[in-house]
Image (cartoon, grey):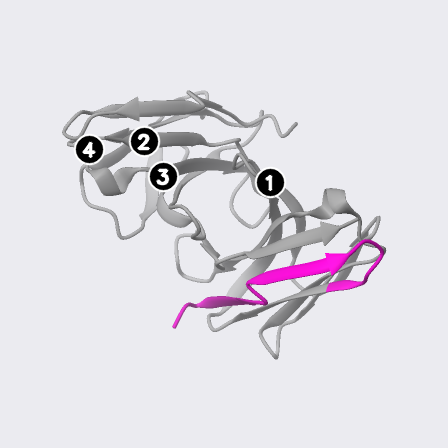
Amino acid sequence: ETGVTQSPTHLIKTRGQQVTLRCSSQSGHNTVSWYQQALGQGPQFIFQYYREEENGRGNFPPRFSGLQFPNYSSELNVNALELDDSALYLCASSFVMNTEAFFGQGTRLTVV
Amino acid sequence: KNEVEQSPQNLTAQEGEFITINCSYSVGISALHWLQQHPGGGIVSLFMLSSGKKKHGRLIATINIQEKHSSLHITASHPRDSAVYICAVVAIGRAQKLVFGQGTRLTINP
C-alpha cells in the first residue's frame, strides 16, 4: 500500500468526450507526475506538478491539462478524447523527484 | 533509439533460478529506479539508486554510473516474482521526470 490513490480505476468514454482523472498523493509529498502507458509500452511522461505549479511537460498536446490542489492532490483532464488516448494513466508522488516515487494503481481509460 | 533500454524484453525461467535484468541509459541521470508492475497495472517501487548497490530480500540492484548501466538480480526466483520489471531514470535537466524503459516481462515457472 503506497498511500497514492487514483480514481476511478476503470473508465470507458466515447471519442470527443472529456475526462477527469484524480490522484491523491502520499501524505507529505509535494510533487505529482502523470504518465500514460499504452498497452505493451513503458510509461510516457505527461507532466509534473510541484507545489501547485506545472514543473515540466512531456510531448502531449494542450488538450491534456492538469491541476494540483493545496493538499497536493492532482487532476488530469483530457479534452476531445481520441481512440489513441486509450491507456493506463499513472500518477506518482514524491517529495521532490530525487526521492523515491510512489505510484498509484492507475486508471485504465478506454475510448470507444 | 530509446534513452533507456532494457534487456531482455521477455524472460522465462524455472523456479529457483538466478535472474538478471539489464538496463542501459544514454542520458545523464541523478537517480535510477527499478519498478515492478503486476497485471492490472499497479507499479511498486523496488529500489532507487544513485550509486553502488542495494539489497532487499532476494532482490539486488547495482548501478555503474560511468558505464551508464544498472542490473536487477533476483536470487532463488519464485513464481510470485512473475511481473514486468521496469527501469526508469531521473534525467538531469528534464524537470526531474522519470524516463522509462520498455520493461522486461519475467515469467517464473514452478
Magenta-span inclusion, residue B41: no
Closer to the camera in the image, A36 or B94: A36
Describe the element under mark 3 as helix, strand or loop.
strand
Q: Which residues are magenta?
A: B1-19
Identify which residue is drawn at 55% across, 35% down.
B42
Tag 2 and tag 3, C-beta contact below 8 Å: no
Residue A91 spot, x, y in % from top left:
45, 35
Q: CA distance from mark 3 to mark 1?
A: 16 Å
Q: Where on the picture, by quarter, is residue B37?
A: top right
Q: Amino acid at mark 1?
A: His
Foreground mark, 4 or 2, reads 2
Quadrant of the frame with the N terminus of chain A? top right
Dot 2: within a 10 Å radius of its alpha carbon, few (fewer than 14), some, or many (20 or more) residues?
some
Mark 4 residue element? loop
B60 above or below A50? Answer: below
Instruction: Bin the neighbour count of mark 4 within 10 Å (Cα to Cα): few under 14, some 14-19, many 20 and up.
Output: many
Q: CA distance from mark 2 to mark 3?
A: 7 Å
Name the image quarter holding the C terminus of chain A: top left
* Residue B27 image offset from top left, x and y in percent: 46, 70
Residue underneath mark 1:
B38
Q: Residues within 10 Å of mark 1 (few under 14, many from 20)?
A: some
* Residue type of the residue flagged with mark 4: Leu
User: Which residue in the protein does label 4 denote?
Assistant: A81
Residue bearing the label numbered 3: A87
- In the rendered image, residue B10 lying in the magenta stretch gets the answer yes
Outermost residue to the bottom: B67
Q: CA distance from mark 4 to mark 3?
A: 12 Å
Inspect the image, locate mark 2, and give the three-letter code of the amino acid beneath it. Thr
Alpha carbon distance from label 4 to label 2 = 10 Å
Instruction: State the CA–CA distance, disc 2 to disc 1.
Output: 19 Å
Mark 2 = which residue?
Answer: A110
Chain of the residue under label 4: A
